[in-house]
Amino acid sequence: MISFKIGIIGAGHISEKIAETIEKLDAFEIDAIAARDKARAEEFASKFGIKKAYGSYEELLADPDIELVYVGTINTTHAEIAKMCIEAGKPCLVEKPFTCNVKTAEEVISLARKKGVFIGEAMWTKFHPMMYSIIDILSKNLVGDIRLIEAHIGYNLIKNERVTKPELGGSALLDIGIYPIDAVMMFMNGGPLTINSNCVKLDTGVDAIGSVLMNFPNGKVASVYFTSVTDIANTCTIYATRGRIEIDNINCPEEAFVYDINGNKIAELKPNDRYINGYEYQFIEARNAIITGKPEPKQHTHNDIMSFLSLADMIRVNWNMILPIPGEPTAEDIKERNERAIAALKQRQAELNAAKNPS
């Protein structure tokens, strides 16, 4: 069987998790690893039996055998390295968050579209089959209409500089809050109409605990809580008019239970027998998109990436939590975006009204 060859940029913890996954994934192979420190790349290669170890990203991007690059570096380098991949014509899967703000994400996606190169975000939640089983239950109206979603996630990451240092893109919202918020928007089939949010910051100035209340069309509401200072239950509950769905481990669902209005369990969901750890699905779908000439994976589109980052920009401006990196939003940016969104909604409503009442 011909293997799809992956090149990994960055030799940190998340790249190790990816390497462990791909080792067990049929028809995939890690062909090369690159790090700024060649000794570290060589150590990584030795640990995982990788053929090639490069001491620069440019060397890996010049390797003609590489069919997909995975970027597993710190948040603030994602945009720069993604652009390098695109310029080299290499399809690229960037670890979440795709970038730290909308402006840099727009630059990367625009370049990828211009050059005709696949690029996606390695947002494993959005590729997990169990998420689509839950959406199928919702679409079949087995528990009725969604009224409220509650989601929580928390880990003790206080010693992780990527989460605590603003110059590294530190933010509980961007690091783990992205999971429940993206899941909520997935279940609600779109973004919120309005939000209210609060946070508690570390001494470094970045958010460590956050809450976001989101209001959706037709009176639907979602509340999300996240923290990087303590472990909490990573759960999500979807309350609907005729029952509820309880999901364990919202960032990578391990099981879900469906209950009717009387609290009787009517279904139970678990990963299939071929499940590795959840990371595998984003690589399978990236490969599918690449070999069929698609610019993005259908499960997590460029628009999905932009939707979360737009929301995160708005939340962080409200918190006065601006990072010392390029592309950060201002209050004026958020006001202008909101005005454009309102104008678009009004235009759409006018078109719908015109269609209903032709002259």
Image (cartoon, helix red, strand yellow):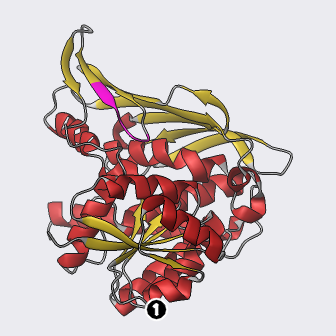
Where is residue 11? Give x, y as percent. Answer: 57, 64
Looking at the picture, tell me which residue is in the foreground, 261 or 295: 295
User: Which residue shows up at 44% across the image and 60% down it?
Assistant: 48
The quarter of the picture where residue 227 lies is top right
Q: Residues within 10 Å of mark 1 (few under 14, many from 20)?
A: some
Name the image quarter holding residue 294. Answer: bottom left
- Horizontal side of residue 182 vs 138, given as left or right: right
Q: Is residue 135 left or right of residue 176?
A: left
Residue sitting farthest toward the right: 203
Asked whether 141 or 342 is in front, the reply is 141
Q: In the image, what residue type sits under mark 1?
A: Glu
Q: Please determine whether, in this image, residue 174 is positioned above or below residue 119.
A: above
Instruction: Give above or below for 322 relative to 246.
Output: below
In the displayed structure, 262 sits above or below 91; it is above
Q: Residue at x 53, y 36 (%)?
A: 224
Q: Is residue 28 above or below residue 160?
A: below
Q: Give, as a single range, the part of the protein colored magenta.
A: 251-256
User: Does 132 lie within the magenta span?
Assistant: no
Where residue 128 appears, as percent x and y from the top left, is 30, 47
Viewer-nearest residue: 65 or 49: 49
Tell me the residue that label 1 is attached to.
Answer: 87
- SS class of the residue under badge 1? helix
Which residue: 31% across, 32% down? 146
Q: Quadrant of the C terminus?
A: bottom left
